[in-house]
Every structure is written in C-alpha cells, then in structure tokens.
Amino acid sequence: ELELIQQKGFVSYFLINYDIVTFAQQRNFYHVGRGSGANSIVAYCLGITDVDPIELDLYFERFINLYRENPPDFDIDFSWTDRDEVTNYIFQKYNRGKVEHVALLGSYSTFQYNSVFRELGKVFGLPKSDIESLIHFANKEGYEPDQFGKLIIKYSQVLHDMPSHLTIHACGILISHKPIHYYTATDMPPKGFPLAHIDMHIAEDIGLHKFDILSQRGLGHIKSAIETIYQNQGVKVDIREVDKFKKDPKIKEMLRTGHTIGAFYVESPAMRMLLSKMKADEYLELVAASSIIRPGVARSGMMREYILRHVDEERRKMAHPVLADIMPETYGIMVYQEDVIKVAHYFAGLSLGEADVLRRGMSGKSRSKDEFQRIREKFFSNCKEMGREDKVAAEVWYQIESFAGYSFAKGHSASFAVESYQSMYLKAYFPLEFMVGVVNNFGGFYHTEFYIHELRMNGADIQAPHINESDYLTRITGKTVYLGLIHMKFLEKATVEKILAERRENGAFLGLADFVARVAISLEQLLILIRMTCFRFTGKTKQELLWEAHFILNKKKAIPATNELFRTGGLAFGNRQPEIPVLEAVDIRQEILDQIDILEFPLDSPFHLVKDQSIQGIKARDLESHLGKMVMILGYLVTVKYTRTVKGEVMNFGTLLDRDGNWIDTVHFPPVVKKYPFKGRAIYRIEGKVTEEFGFFSIEVNLLERMAYWNAAD
C-alpha cells in the first residue's frame, strides 16, 4: 500500500486527512471514515477509519489501483454540531496568510425539462399558466404549440443539461499546493468560506484533491449520549471498544430480534425486518445487511435470495459455481460494489481497470458512454469465449445492472456497521441516556414522538415541560426525563432564553404571579406554558391558571419584569387576588389535544382519543398465536413506506403501535391501497391475515379504517 500511495503521489492526501481526524480527536469530536477509503490498512493504522480491512478481506485496489486515474476519496463524517468547526480548522490551517489555498468545491445545477421550459417561458414573457400548460402538454401526442411554444421546445433541446447556476457541493473542500486562484475564480457565499467555480470532474482532471467533510446526526446521538451518561451516572464510556461490542450477548440479542430503534442505520422498519429474518447477530452479517437493504439488491430479487441462502444451506447449492467461488461469504450473490469488479474480472475476464470502469459507469460516475458501451460489449464477448451460457451471462449482467448504482462498497458498509455497534452498545447498557441523546439531536428515521415512546418503554418517567425543571433541551435525572422547552413549537426562543436566564440568576419560580413579575411575557406566550402544564408545581388546575393569567395580564402585550426587594411570591400586583369560580377538571382527552397542538405529539396514550372505546382488537404480542388467521387490531400510525410493484402499481408497508406500545408491521397490496389508503397520522382499525416469513410476523391488510376521534363539542 505504501509503495502504491507514494507511486501515485497520494502521500499528502493521506497526511492531510490524518491531520483533520487528529484535530477532531483532540477536540473530542467523533468521526467515521467511510467509503472505499476503509479498504486501506494505512488509513486504519492512521485512525482515519475504524474498519480493519484484513479482518474483512477488503480489496485495496477498490480504493487505489494503477489503472485508476482519478484521486481516491475519503468520506469523513462528523457530528452535525462539530462539522463547521472542522471546516474552519481546514481553512485556517491550510491557507497561508492572506493567500488562499482552500475553497469549497462548486457544483453546477443544469437545466432539466421543467426548469428550461420555465426559464425560456419567462424570456418570451409568457404568463405562468401558459408555461405550466406547455410543460404538461409538450410531450403529448397530437399537441400543436403556438409560435412561442415551438421556439421554447426548439431551444429547450439545445439548453437541456447545460449549466444553469453554481451551487455548493454537499461536502467537498479543495486544497491546492499553489494558491487556489491559479486554477479557478472564487466567490463568497453566505456560508462564509470561498467557493470555487469548478466542479468535482474538473478538479479531478486538473489534479486537485477533494476532501469530503460530511455531517450526520448518528454521531451526535453518540456524543450526546456519552455526555449524558457521565452527567447522570458518573460513568465514562469508551466507545472505541468495538471488538468487545461485536461479541456482546446483549447486543446480539437486540440485533436478532430487531430491537434497534434509535441505533444508527439499523432502526428503520425495513432494516429491523431484515435483521429479524436473517437472525443476524454477527459483524459480517450486519455488514452484509447494510448493503443488502439498498434499493438495487432488493429490486433485483437478490435480497430475498440472500436471506433464503443465509438460512438454508441446501439453497446455497443453487448458486452458479463460478459465482459461489468468487463470493463464498455472500453465497454467490453480489452484495457490494467490489463484487461487480470481482465478477467482471473472474466471471467475464475483464481486466481490473476495465472492471472498475464498469463499476463507475453503473453508478453514474463515468463520463464516457462510449467507453462504457465498449466494456459492456467486451463483457458479453468474453463470456462467449469463456464458454458461459448466454442465459447465465445475461442474468449476471442483469444483477450488475440492477444494483451496482445503489450498492455500497464493502468498506463503506463496514464503517456504518461499526457506528451501528457503538449505538447498539449505548442502547443496550444505557437506554435512557442514549434515547435522550437521540431526542436532543433531532435526527433519525422516526419522529421525536417515537423516541420518547421508546424512553417510556424502557422505564423512563416522561415529564412534560416544566417551568422550574426543564432546560432548553431534554434532560434526565435518574429515570425522570423532563422534555426541553424547545419542543413547544409556538414558544419563542427569546421567551425560553429569558425564562432560563431569570431562573439561573434568581432561582426557581414560586408561582404564576411570581413568574409574570420576573419575566416580561405576552399573554399569548404565557397561555402556551399553562396549556402545557408547565406550572403544575403550583397545585392549581389548568383552568384556574388560565383564569389567573387573564386576570394578571388583562390583554396587555407584556408586563415588564420588576426587581423585587423581597420575594413576595406573586403579590407584585398588590393585594388584589383573583376570585376563581369552581371549575370542572380537565378531561384527559383535552390534555392530549393540547399536547398534540403544542408539541405536535401526545404524551399520554393517543388511544384515549378513539371515540368508540368498545372496539379493542387483539394485541401485537398475540400475532404469533393467530398465524394464518384473520384478525382485527387497532394501530397508531408511525410511518408508511410507499413502493411500486413490477407492474408499477403502488403498494405500502405500514408500521404502527398497538395500545401496549408494541410494534405492528403491515403489508398493503395495490388493490387495498386503492380502496383503503392511509389518511395521515391517526389510529386505524386494521383487518387482515397474519403471515410469517423467516420468523417475522406481519399482517396482510384487507381493510383499513381511520378511527373517529372524540371531539369536545360532542
């Protein structure tokens, strides 16, 4: 590796990446080095990646080979909260005084069908309605455009795929030996860093190295969780003990059963289903799963075939002997991008350089269609010369074609698997602190509501925002979790900052009047706090507090805060106290509606809102005992996956929760989707047949009905 790195002139590229991750480690920033760079033992030794390429038998040639002209890529992920500081470090370190050597990589947005019609329509002064009509009808048979329409259609064909405007590449940073202006002009976008006027293809052609500095929230989850564990339990966690995590029985059990909510990359319904079906509990199985779940493998039917061969040794004998020999670890099925290279080289006799051109062409990275077509023809001619059956050669090509553009490099999958193990360790041994970390980073597959649900299912005492206990973000003490004030969508940030500053300065609030005396707040903002029961420590009901708030503020915009010589506990408005009549207690259903209005999700069970409480249905945990039978069950919608069948018809996969908070997985075939579509977030009555595949239970839905909710006016 070292010889090839030196021969290709990539020493500085490795050393700069090493410098970047070293800076991050000094700042206690977590990172993941992924992509094909994880195939390098040098990168592993330098700490750029956490993936051992010898353990996984990764091919360094996938990262750098003598035939590869373009420079290699390291994709380095940081937490979304740390990325800007890392970027700033790169600009500070590698710019020399006032001479700029660093710039953000540019990218060109090109004119596509709709945009070119709209821009040309504006040139000809056409109204919006005429432009949209032209877009809609231009390709329709028998449509006859007017004189302007004919010109727009004519010039649209000329402008199609031409550059429209310059944008910023998602993550690329250029570092040049000579000042950057030797190569390109720059400008200064609002981001605050110079932007190059060239894209990645031109940068490659002129020999500039691109450094990919990305961000993701999964690392934010880990970082926040570790900090929270230390604050709540005084325990310091070493998250780099990945070898230990791989063997941990608790983590193995969670993977086998799909209990992975909150864990990076393995928490989606599809991934939970795949892990459950595979009974995956080994590192290599998780690495394979993270690539199998990609659209290409699933679309070609190879995901199902992989599961079948994984659970049934007899099924593995169906693999083509050459493919089984090339890819024994994955039972003769192409799972990773490297498999394209291996199959093209060993099965079809292409050189490694030609095989890499094939891989890049399949993934849309090749700019030479003629070269790709030449290699495609050589693939089939070589197969014929080598005595491969035409049918088998065509089937192998179909597999390559259907998944190569969507597959991961094996090193990339392994990098994701390492982060998944780190998340799973925290979830297994510190579930409450970990889920608080997930909630506070506002990222993941699910809505915040369902991470709070997971907290509750793990024994947390979930408390609504509290004026004396809540911080800006969610916090945990022992097993008590106080939701952060940030979750109240109508509460202004300035109001939150005033509340927290006053509390830090002068201590807890004694009551509503004391609060209003100390914090300048409008009636509208105060009512939000009351409706969310933020003043429940006073012992007064919500209605009493609402009455008192109107009495104190009396439609004034805000009462300026006053500094009292003595704490009167709320007699700052004189001895006049409101006379509050006896009021009815708030219905739990009204509480839930207030929660949904202010938090956008309920803290109490949404099943209280169902108008007809006599409809119960079975429980999710009882599905196994009803296998093959028709059942009725109530489910609170979590998420819906929309996909298309081979015929192009829409079908759904639903994920819901039952009354006990357990997960329900449903399958909705096209006729059912047409007749009984989902109608937004709600509780649904589901009728269907319980099915099982590889030990994973779901319901094939025959009927889906949105349940009527209680209304205070009823």
Image: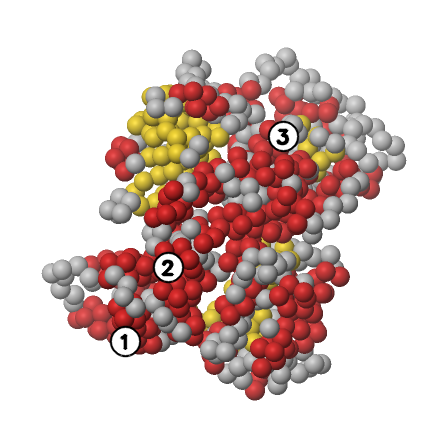
Residue identified by numbered label 2: 322
Rendered position, 173 above or below 236: below
Q: Residue furthest right?
A: 565
Left or right, 311 with respect to 604, comes to left
Circles 2 and 1, Cβ within 8 Å, touching? The answer is no
Q: Relative to residue 437, is residue 589 drawn left or right?
A: left
Q: CA distance from mark 1 to mark 3?
A: 60 Å
Of marks 2 and 3, which one's residue comes earlier in the chain?
Answer: 2
Q: Secondary structure at mark 1?
A: helix
Residue in the picture at 62% in, 46% down? 246
Q: Which residue is mark 3?
A: 458
Mark nearest the camera among 2 and 1 is 2
Q: Amino acid at mark 3?
A: Asn
Residue highlighted by disc 1: 158
* Residue 698: % across, % down: 40, 31
Colouring rule applied to residues: secondary structure
Query: Which tag is nearer the camera, tag 1 or tag 3?
Result: 3
Q: Nearer the viewer, residue 224 or 590?
A: 224
Q: Position of residue 174 (x, y in %)?
A: 57, 75
The amino acid type of the residue labelled 1 equals: Val
Between the residue at mark 2 and the residue at mark 3, the CA separation in whole angstroms equals 49 Å
User: Which type of secondary structure does the marked residue at label 2 adopt?
Assistant: helix
